[in-house]
Image (tube, grey):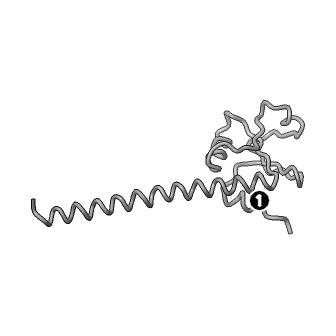
Amino acid sequence: MDPTIIIVLVILLIILIAYRKSSSAFVGGKRRFSNDIVSELVGEKWILFSKKECPWCVKQAAELGGAYPNTIYSDSPEIKKHGVESFPTWYNSRTKQYKPGFRTKAQLFEMMRPVK
């Protein structure tokens, strides 16, 4: 076999291995970012009112990297107690603030900032 072909194949193999490592690091980085924001939301006492069949609620869960631990679903009596009618709705049990609608990660971080 021609040495040039072997060198090209080795270089391609190195590039492929480097690409796979960087791709998996990106996924890991994204997962860590989602876990960080979930931890902060839970720590700041944010509750998510959600509806299982609502496409925006599904999108909100995906934005957080999966299910959010402090979620109250529409079939819960808590929904009536809080008078929530639109989904998703964020509620801070410490400050008693309601924030209806889907939020990106950036908007969620912004939502957690104290009001000045």
Q: Is residue 116 above or below residue 71?
A: below
Residue at the far left in the pictured view: 1
**Residue beneath the point at 68% across and 42% down:** 57
Q: Residues within 10 Å of mark 1 (few under 14, many from 20)?
A: some
Please give left or right for residue 50 compared with residue 92 in the image. left
Along the viewing direction, whichever of 109 and 3 lies nearer the viewer: 3
Identify the image quadrant of the N terminus: bottom left
In the rendering, at what x and y percent does residue 22 appear? 44, 61
**Closer to the camera in the image, 72 or 20:** 20
Q: Residue at x 21, y 64 (%)?
A: 8
Q: Picture quarter containing residue 6?
A: bottom left
The residue identified by callout 1 is 111
Tag 1: amino acid? Met
Nearer-the-camera pick, 51 or 65: 65
Secondary structure found at label 1: helix
Percent coordinates x, y for residue 59 in the rendering: 63, 45
Where on the picture, by quarter, is residue 2? bottom left
Position of residue 24 relative to residue 75, above or below, is below
Residue drawn at 85 percent across, 36 percent down: 78
**Place of residue 35 in the rendered image (x, y in percent of width and height, measured from the top left):** 65, 53
On the image, the x and y values in percent for residue 55 come to 64, 39
Residue depicted at x 77% and y 59%: 111
Q: Quadrant of the C terminus?
A: bottom right
**33 with respect to 10 (left or right):** right
Is 11 situated left or right of 5 in this image?
A: right
Residue 114, by quadrant, is bottom right
Give the number of callouts. 1
